[in-house]
Image (tube, helix red, strand yellow):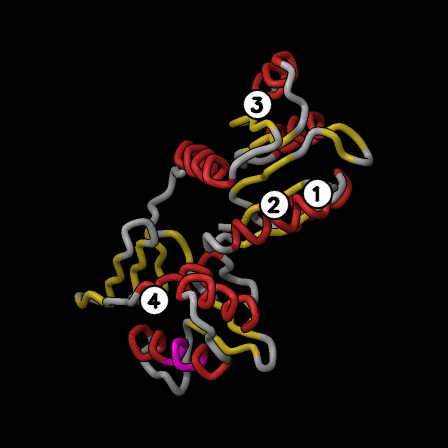
Amino acid sequence: MKILVVEDNETIAEGLKYSLECESYSVDISNSIKTAKENIANNMYSLVILDIMLPDGDGVSLCRDIKSNYEIPVIFLTAKDKEQDIVNGLNIGADDYIVKPFRIGELLARINNAMRKYNKKDSTIKIDDLKIDLDNKCIQKGNKEIILTSLEWKILATLLNARGNIVTRDKLLNLVYDISGNFINDNSLTVYIKRLREKLEDDINNPKIIKTIKGIGYKVENAHNK
């Protein structure tokens, strides 16, 4: 799942990006309305987190534009805490309104609630004969159930949420370290990817699901919602 954070405060933006990526979201940052519009036009986002006070305009107008042209949930995350600001934000179509300072756990819960409203498609992702249900952590390959470890699930979920885009080795290494609490080196990541391929691919010497982008990382292609 790919999220756009529209926030001109670099510290807040980078903190959000780190926290959301630890939850297996793919995150882009825009620091202005102009770059946000460019990102939305060129990417498929599952959700937008939007500040109201931006250097080149009002986030309310951007929310109105998003709601007029796209079917994407929008959550305001702003320091504007007056009741009328909150009412106005919700009245123009925002799916939620969170006042700064905020707690990341609350934000994650609000994201889940917003996404449930928009989850019109089956949660299962299909790749050839694989059916992967990320919500329930189930994989079927033909008639066979595939069992993954928690770390393997986290790596696979990160790749699937970013499907069509490259996930760098550094990002995956940081992710695995964050979960395990132990240092994981580059060779260990290669082992995890190999184990995933052994479970998912028909031919690990010619992988068609998890592709290596030499010198950069990995990418999943040809994945679509069932």
Q: Earlier in the sequence, mark 1 or mark 4?
A: 1
Q: Nearer the viewer, mark 2 or mark 3?
A: 2
Q: Residue at the left extreme?
A: 143
* Residue at numbered disc 1: 36
How far is disc 2 from disc 3 in space, using C-alphas?
17 Å
Q: Residue at x 26, y 57 (%)?
A: 138
Disc 4 or disc 3, which is closer to the eye? 3
Name the amino acid type tagged 2. Answer: Leu
Badge 2 crowding class, 10 Å Cα cut-off, few under 14, some 14 to 19, many 20 or more, is many
Q: Main secondary structure of the magenta part?
A: helix
- Residue 45 in sight from this viewpoint: yes
The span picked out in magenta is 190-194
Closer to the chain start, of discs 1 and 2, is 2
Q: Which residue is mark 4?
A: 128
Task: For the residues labelled 1 and 3, say whether their Cβ atoms are less than 8 Å apart.
Answer: no
Whether residue 193 is in magenta: the answer is yes
The answer to whether 148 appears left or right of 109 in the picture is left
> How far separated are the C-alphas under marks 1 and 2?
8 Å
The location of residue 201, given as percent across then percent down, is 34, 76
Q: Is residue 122 above or below residue 79?
A: below
Residue of label 2: 4
Residue at 61% x, 13% y is: 83
